[in-house]
Image (tube, coloured by chain):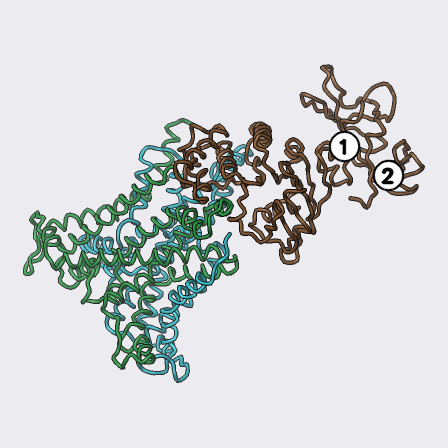
Chain colours: A green, B cyan, C brown
Amino acid sequence: MSTSQVKKVPYLLTTPGVLFFALLLGAPMVMTFLLSLHSYDFNTGIQTDWTIANYIEVLGDPYFQKIFARTFGLSLLVTVICILIGVPEAYVLSRLSSKWRSIFLLIVLGPLLISVVVRTLGWALFFGGNGVLTMISQALGFGDEPVSLMFTFTGMTIALVHVLVPFMVISVWASLQKIDPQSEDAGLSLGASKMTVLRRITLPQAMPGILSGSIIVFALTASAFATPAIIGGRRLKVVATAAYDEYLSTLNWPLGAAIAVILLLANILIIVSYNKVIERRFANIFE
Amino acid sequence: MQKLGLTALIFHAIFVIFILAPLVMVVAVSFTDKGYLSLPTDGLSLRWFYAILDNPDFIDAFWMSLWLAFISASIAVIISVPAALAIARHKFPGRDTISAFLLSPLMIPHLVLGVAFLQFYSSIGLGGSFFGLAAAHVILITPYSLRLALASATGLSTDAENAALTLGASKFTVFRRITLPLILPGVAGGWILAFITSFDELTMSVFVASPATQTLPVKMYHHITQTIDPLIASISTVLIVLTFIVMLILDRFYGLDKIFIGKG
Amino acid sequence: MSFLKFESLTKKFGDFVAVRDMSLDIEKGEFISLLGPSGCGKTTTLQMVAGLLTPTSGKISLDGKDITETPPNERGLGIVFQTYALFPHMTAIENVSFGLEMRGVAKAERIERASNALEQVKLGQFMNRYPKQMSGGQRQRVALARALVIGPPVLLLDEPLSNLDAKLREEMRLELRILQQDIGVTTVLVTHDQEEALSMSDRIVVMKQGDISQIAAPLELYERPTNTFVSDFVGKTNLLKGEVTDNNQVSVNGIKFEVDTKMHKQGTRIDLSIRPEKFRMSNDKKGQEVRVDASIFLGASWLYSVSSDLGQLFVTQPNTGTAGYSKGDIAWLDWQKGALTLFEEAAS
C-alpha cells in the first residue's frame, strides 16, 4: 500500500457529504448574503444594486432595535431561569435511585422528542382568555376577569423555558455523571458540610455542563420561531418572527435576509467566543 | 452519595408538574365533548379523534412528514457514516475543516436556513418541490447522525480489524463483518435522532414547504395561527402518544440520555 | 486500651449481610489491614469507620468516644480513596488546604501547612498543578497529603495503591509505611493484595463474606493460618485432602507420613497445607518421589509443577546459580514436619 493511496481514502469517504453541503448549504447561504446587499422597491421588487442600506436600516431603525433588544432580553431571561431550575433538577435526577431516575429522565427529556408546536399549543391552552389560568384565578376568587398570558412577554418566557429547559438538564446531567462520587465523600471527610460540598465540590465540577447548557439555551431562544410566533404573535415580535414577516408578508426579502445574516453572525459570534472562554478556563481541569 | 432532602423532592415534584402540565392539558382538551375549547367536564368524548378522519389534509401531512423524515434520515446516514469513519480514523489535511463544515448547520438558526433555501430554490426553479424540502432536511439533520456516528467510530480500536485482516479477511469483508457491526448502534441511534428531528422540524420547513409538500408541524402551525380548536388538540394527543411509544422503545434499547447528548 | 474499637459491627443491604458481627480493637499508632477478596466486607467496614455508611447495628468508638452516629464531616479522619477523589477543579495546594479551610485555619497558615505537607510527599514543585496535569503516583501523593494535613487521629486507606503500576506500587508501599511510622498515625488499610497487607501492616484482619477469618501479625498469618481460606488467600500453598490414621500420622491418597496431629482424633478428615517454598527438592531419593511436569525460571527462584502420588504440587526452590530441573526429570521432595498445617475439613 503506497502512502498516496492511504491519503486518498479519507477524501473519498468525505466527498459525498462535502459536495452535498457545498452545493445545498454553501450556495444558499452565499446567495442570502448577496441578497441582503440589494435594495428593495415596493413597486418593482428586488433591485440589482449593491448597498448596505438594509443593514443600516435594521441596526438603525428603533422598530428593529426594539425587536433585537426584546429577543436578547428574552434569551437572557430564559437562560437564567433554565439555569435556576434546570441545574437543581439535574442534581436531583443524579441522586435518585436508578429506577426512579430512568422514569424521571424519560419525563424530563421526553418532551424534546415532541414537536415544539404541540408543546407550545399546551401553553396556549393554559394562557388563552378562556383557558385554565382564568378558571384557576376565578376559582381562587381573584375576580371574574379572564386572565390571559397570550401575547405577553411572561407567557413567551414560560413557554420557552418549558421548551428549552430539557437541554439544560441533559447538559448538566452529563457533567454530573462524570463527577467521581468519592470526591464528594472526600469533601465530607475533610470536614465540609453538605451545603459546602455542594457549593465547593459538586457545583464547580458541573460548571462545564452549566455553561454549555446555557449557550445552547441562549442560542436556541435567540433564534426560536414557533413559540414566539404562537404565544407572542404579531404583537411581540422577536428576530425570527420579524424576519418571517419580512419574507412572507411584506415580501421585502433583502431586508429579511439582512436580519437573517445579523442573527446568524450574532449566533456564531456568541457560540464561538463562549467556547473559547470555556476552553481557556477548563482546558487544564477537565477532560 | 448524599441523600435528597424534602425541599429537593418538593422542587422535583413541581418541576415534573411544570414539564407535564401543557402536555396533560392538550390531552385533556382533546377528549372534550363540546364543539369548542374546553376541559371534558361532562364526560369524555372521542368526537375530536373521529374528526381527524374527516380532515384528510392532516392525515396527508402526517404521511408526508413520515416519508420525508424516513428519506432524509436515510440520506443523512449514508452521507455521515463514511465521513465519520474518515474523520475519526484518519489524519489528513483539511480534516478539521471538513468536520466543522459538516457540523456547521448546528450553528445556523433554522430560520436562517429556511430563508436561504427559500431564495435558493425559487431562483433555481425547485421552489416548493419535495426534492428541495428533503435536501434541506438532510442538511439540517446530518450533523446529528454525524455526531453519533463519530462518537462510536472514535471509540473503535483498530485491533479487531487488524485481527480480521491477519485472519485472511478482505478489506470489504472487514468493513462488513467487523467495522459496521461495531458502529451500528451509533449509526442506528443517529438515524433515529435524525428522523425525529426531521419529523418535528417547523421553522425551516415553514419557508420551504409548499401546500403540496406541507409537513404535519407546518400544517399544524398554520392551523393554530388561524384558530385553536379541539381538533388540533386531538391531533397533538395522537402525536404525544406516538412519541411516547417511540421514546419507550428508544429508552429500552439505548437509554434516552445517550441519544439526547447527541442532540445537545 | 484500644484506640479505635468496633463492637459487633453489622451492616446489611436488604437481605445481604455485608459485615457480620465484627469486633476489633486497634491500638494507637497501629497499622492494620483489612484483607480479603472483593465482596468480603472490607470496604463496607472502612466506609462505616469513615461515616459514609451507617452500621445496621453495633458500635464504633474512637479514643473512648462513641462515633457510630457522628456524620463524616465531624469525624476528622483522613481518608485516601481508591480513585484518590481529588477535586479536579482545584490545584494540588488547593486540594490539600481544603480541609484546613473547613477547620477555619487562616489563609497564611493554611498555605504554609499545605506546602509543608506537599513537601513531605515530595511534591514541592507541583503545588500549582491541577490533578489532570499530574501522573497517577503524584495524584496519589496529593491525596495522601490532603488526608494527613488535617492531623487526623486515624488514616483510612481504601486500596490506595491499586491504580499504580507494579514498580511504583512497591516503592509507595515502603514510602507509605515509613511516613506512617514517622507520624505515628493509626492507620486502617483496605486491600485485596496480600503482598501489600503483609509488607505494610502490624496486624492483618482477613475477611471472608462479611466475617473475620483470622486476625494475626503478618508472619504468624503466613506461617500459621487457622483455616484453608487464609492459607490459600495469603501466599501460595498446596492443599491436600487426607485423614488422620494414627497419633502422629496422616494418610493422603494412601501415603502415610508424620505430622503433629495431637489435636486431631483418629479418622478425622483433614485438609493439609504446605507452602511451595517449604519443600526441599533433591536427587537423594529421600521423601516423596515426583516427576517434573513444568519448570519456570523466575529469576530469584524456580517454580515447578510436579506430579506425585500425593497429587499435583507446586514447588518453589531458590535459584542457586545452577541449572534447575527440566520437564520429565524425576526428583524427591522432602519437608520438615512443622511445615505442614492441618485443618479439620469443616474449618474452612
Disc with the residue nearer the chain's start (1 vs 2): 1
Quarter placement of the N terminus of chain A:
top left
The dot on residue A229 is none
Disc 1 chain ID: C
Q: Nearer the viewer, residue B158 or A124?
A: A124
The residue drawn where x is 13% and y is 60% is A251
Position of residue A171 in the picture relative to residue B229 (left or right): right
Q: Position of residue C283 (x, y in %)?
A: 84, 19
Image quadrant assignment for residue C233: top right
Q: As drawn, which residue projects farthest toward the top?
A: C322
The residue drawn where x is 18% and y is 60% is A242
Question: Which type of secondary structure does the marked residue at label 1 adopt?
Answer: helix
Disc 2 chain ID: C
Q: As drawn, which residue projects farthest toward the right?
A: C246
Question: Which type of secondary structure does the marked residue at label 2 adopt?
Answer: strand
Q: Is residue C293 above or below residue A112?
A: above
Image quadrant assignment for residue A85: bottom left
Q: Nearer the viewer, residue C25 or C340?
A: C25
* Res B34 visible: yes
Position of residue C112 in the picture relative to residue A162 (left or right): right
Position of residue C39 in the picture relative to residue B36 (left or right): right
Q: Position of residue A256 (x, y in %)?
A: 16, 56
Q: Is residue B224 above or below residue C100?
A: below
Q: Amino acid at mark 1?
A: Glu
Q: Are marks 1 and 2 on the same chain?
A: yes
Residue at the spot of label 2: C242
Residue at the spot of label 1: C223
Q: CA distance from mark 1 to mark 2?
A: 20 Å
Badge 2: residue crowd in 10 Å (few <14, some 14–19, many ≥20): many
The residue drawn where x is 64% and y is 36% is C30
Quarter placement of the C terminus of chain A:
top left
